[in-house]
Amino acid sequence: MGTVTSVPFRLIGDLRMDRVMPAWAEHYPRYDTVVGYSDLGHAFLMSSRTGEYGILDPYSPGVKDYGSYTEVTEFVSEVLFDPNVITYVLQPQHVAEIRKRLGPLAADEVYIATPYPFLGGSEAPDAYQKGGVWVFFDLVAQAQDFE
């Protein structure tokens, strides 16, 4: 199971992207491994070939590359604890408001904006529900016509 941290994300070990996020893997061939995800559904990706890390935003599909790191712990300390990433990606205050309403996430769950923001959802705290992280990525890929 994922490691729960003081900020709203989980590290999950190294999972093959083509197995857990097949609809996304073909669109971002540079990355082949999923190492974690945020409580709001951003995936943390890695290239096992180059050591490059990136963050996938499934709502406005794209991966922001953050460069190469030897260890995931370096990616966490350099990227996930960066104040801009905390503010704009991890959004701990926003997550705290959602958590107050829905309760904490179970393993392999994320908070999902309903409807998805790219389909007109507001992302207000009361517009979220909990759901399985891998189903979430599949459904968002289908809604983005990525299937």
Image (cartoon, helix red, strand yellow):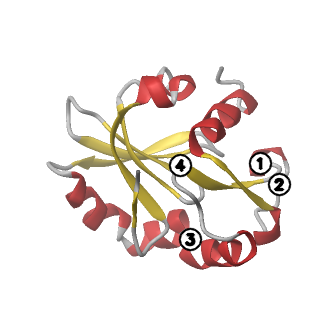
Mark 1 vs mark 2, CA separation in Å: 5 Å
Q: Which residue is mark 3?
A: 91
- Whole-percent x and y of residue 77? 26, 67
Q: Amino acid at mark 2?
A: Gly
Q: Which residue is mark 2?
A: 121
Image point 73% across, 69% down: which residue?
102
Q: Are marks 3 and 2 in contact (CB under 8 Å)?
A: no
Quarter of the figure that contains the C terminus: top right
Q: Which residue is mark 1?
A: 116
Q: Are marks 1 and 2 in contact (CB under 8 Å)?
A: yes
Q: Which residue is mark 4?
A: 108
Decide which of tag 4 and tag 3 comes sooner along the chain: 3
Image point 59% across, 39% down: which residue?
61
Decide which of tag 1 and tag 2 comes sooner along the chain: 1
- Whole-percent x and y of residue 106? 57, 58
Specify the label residue 62 is tagged with.
none
Q: Residue furthest left?
A: 70
Asked if residue 9 shows in the view, the reply is: yes
In the displayed structure, 95 sits above or below 27; it is below
Check disc 4: other Cα within 10 Å, few if <14, some if 14-19, many if 20+. Answer: some
Decide which of tag 4 and tag 2 comes sooner along the chain: 4
Mark 1 vs mark 3, CA separation in Å: 17 Å
Q: Secondary structure at mark 2?
A: loop
Image point 53% across, 51% down: which residue?
42
